[in-house]
Amino acid sequence: MRVDIEDVSVDVAGVRLLSDITLRAGSGRFIGLVGPNGSGKSTLLRCVYRALRPSAGTVRLDGAELAAMTAREQARRLAVLPQETATDFDFTAAEVVAMGRLPHQRGGSGRPGAADREICAAALSRTGTGHLADRGFTSLSGGEKQRVLIARALAQRPRVLVLDEPTNHLDIAQQLEVLALVRGWGRPGDGAEGGVTVLAALHDLNLAAVHCDELYVVAGGRIVASGAPHDVLTEELLAEVFHVRAHRVTHPESGAVQLLFDRIAPTTP
C-alpha cells in the first residue's frame, strides 16, 4: 500500500513543529525517518496514524485520504507501535496480541475465531514471545513488552506499519531480529499482497542504513535530505544535522554504509 504525505504542516500553541513535509513511500518499501531529538519525526508519524491533526496538508493511503476513513477502516490498513504505550493493563501477553485482531472481527465482538488464534500464535512465535503467552503483561520486562506489542501489530495484518523507535528496550540481538522481521514482512506467505509498507523513526543510523530502503532526514521540522542510505548519510550532512564527525565504512557482508563517530569539539571563542 502506497503512503503519500503531502505538504503537511503542524502548528501547536502558535509554534510551527512541521513545515511543508512531503514524503512518498511506495508499496512494500521500508522508509526510515532519522534526525536529532526534537526534529519532528514523532510528530510526523502521529499525523500518519491520526493521533495528531495536521494544520495543513494531507495523508493518503493508495490515494484515499486517511482523514476520511473510519477508525475501523484505518485499523484494517494501518498498525502502529508508538514511542509511548500505556502498559498498566492487566492482560496476559496472548490477550494483548489478540487485540490486534479486533478490527477484523465482525462487529468488534472480541471473540476470536480459529483463524484469529492461528494468526496470533504465529505473531507470538515470530517475535520469540510464545513462551510469554500466559504471563501477565505488567510482569514483563521492557524488552519483552516491546516484542509483545510488535506481535500485536503483526497480528493486525495491516498494509502499513508505523513504528516510532521500535528497538527501544531491546538488546542488540533483539534489535537486529526485530528489524530483520519487519524488513522481510509481507513477502509471499505472510498474507499481505505486494508487501507491507513500513514507516519507522530510528535513532540508530547504522541500523537504519542496513534495513531501510530510503531515508528521510528531518531537522527543524523540515525534510533536509532524502534518498538511499548510501547517498544520504554523508559526512557533510551528519556534521550539519547531528553535529558529529562521521567516518564511513562498508559493512563486510551487506555492503551497506556504516558509520563511526567522533564528536566535533566546540570552538573556543
Image (cartoon, rainbow, N blue to C red):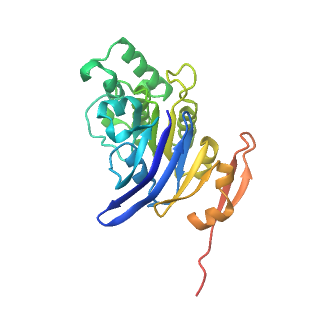
Q: Residue furthest top?
A: 114
Q: Residue at x 45, y 37 (%)?
A: 63
* Residue 25 image point, x, y percent: 53, 41
Q: Residue at x 50, y 36 (%)?
A: 2
* Residue 111 image point, x, y percent: 27, 17
Q: Residue at x 28, y 30 (%)?
A: 91
Question: What is the quadrant of residue 95 in the picture?
Answer: top left
In the picture shown, does residue 138 fall above or below 95? below
In the picture shown, does residue 137 fall above or below 105? below
Q: Is residue 132 left or right of residue 269?
A: left
Residues 117 and 72: in front is: 72
Q: Is residue 211 visible?
A: yes
Question: What is the quadrant of residue 29 in the picture?
Answer: top right
Q: Residue furthest bottom?
A: 269
Residues 36 and 128: in front is: 36
Q: Is residue 106 left or right of residue 181?
A: left
Q: Residue at x 35, y 24 (%)?
A: 101
